Amino acid sequence: MAPTDDPLLLLRQSIAADGKIIPTTSPDSSEEAPLSKATHLVFTHPTRIAVPIDAPTRFTSTEGKAVDVRSIYFAWLNRDFAIPEYNAVATKLNDEMGAAAVHMFAFVERLVLFTFLEGAQEESEFIKPLPGDKDAAAGAGAAATGTALKAAPAASGRAGRGTLDPRLAQIYNGERRMGDRNTILRGIKPTVSRHQPHQLLRIFLTHSRSRTSRTSASSQRLS
């Protein structure tokens, strides 16, 4: 179903724009009919679209069943009723329809539905994403995972310890690198190893001897 034909979005847009919503007995009619006899729900905003009133929506109940358009619209019409009052009017509507039945919304379901229709919520475990949104989210997630795995060279090998699981490599790559023991204890300043003093001493003695030799040669020439 295209986003422009999605009943939940159409109802949400109509509520935001205060557009007229008409239950009718045919898709071409503009005469309002009782919900118990209506076959279509006509939205007039942003354009006129007639949706079958028994069509399933992206809203799923706690049992995992898709809730139909009639039940969604009926719940919105009676949004100010408490649960017992809503159940009473829903039972009356079911008696009038006979075979068809409107969904008896639980408290959490009603709360999520009304929050979404009022525009205060975008995602919920009760509302399935549109096909385009789902594919885009999956593509973005796959791209992010691929980038993270490419940035984790430790996944290919660990000095003879075998191959690291890519998921662990991704976690390790995201961790903050603390450095070695000297870096932790003394910061990033270069530290002097135990061999460096001897190297510095040899350099100092070599320069001293060279300087002494040059000074002796100069003294002999002057004398």
Image (cartoon, rainbow, N blue to C red):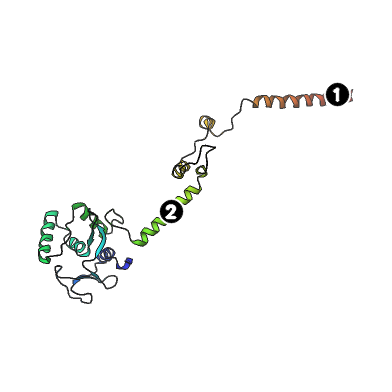
Does 98 sit above or below residue 106? below
Few, some or many C-alpha atoms within 10 Å of disc 1 (few <14, some 14-19, many ≥20)?
Answer: few
Closer to the chain start, of discs 2 and 1, is 2
**What is the quadrant of residue 116 in the picture?**
bottom left
- Residue drawn at (42%, 55%) of the image: 140
Percent position (x, y) of residue 187?
53, 33
| CA–CA distance in space, label 2 to label 1 | 80 Å
**Which residue type does callout 1 highlight?**
Ser
The residue lying furthest to the bottom in this view is: 28
Does 109 sit above or below residue 68? above
Residue in front for this viewpoint, 88 or 60? 60
Percent position (x, y) of residue 87?
12, 57
Q: Nearer the viewer, mark 2 or mark 1?
A: 2
**What is the quadrant of residue 22 in the picture?**
bottom left
| Residue 208 shown left or right of residue 4 in the figure | right
**Which residue type does callout 2 highlight?**
Ala
Residue annotated with mark 2: 142
Few, some or many C-alpha atoms within 10 Å of disc 2 (few <14, some 14-19, many ≥20)?
Answer: few
Does 106 sit above or below residue 174? below
Looking at the rendered structure, which numbered label has been put on residue 219? 1
User: Split into 4 quadrants, where in the image is the N terminus?
Assistant: bottom left
- Residue drawn at (84%, 23%) of the image: 216
- Residue drawn at (29%, 64%) of the image: 9
Percent position (x, y) of residue 195?
64, 26
Percent position (x, y) of residue 126?
26, 55
> Label 1's element?
helix
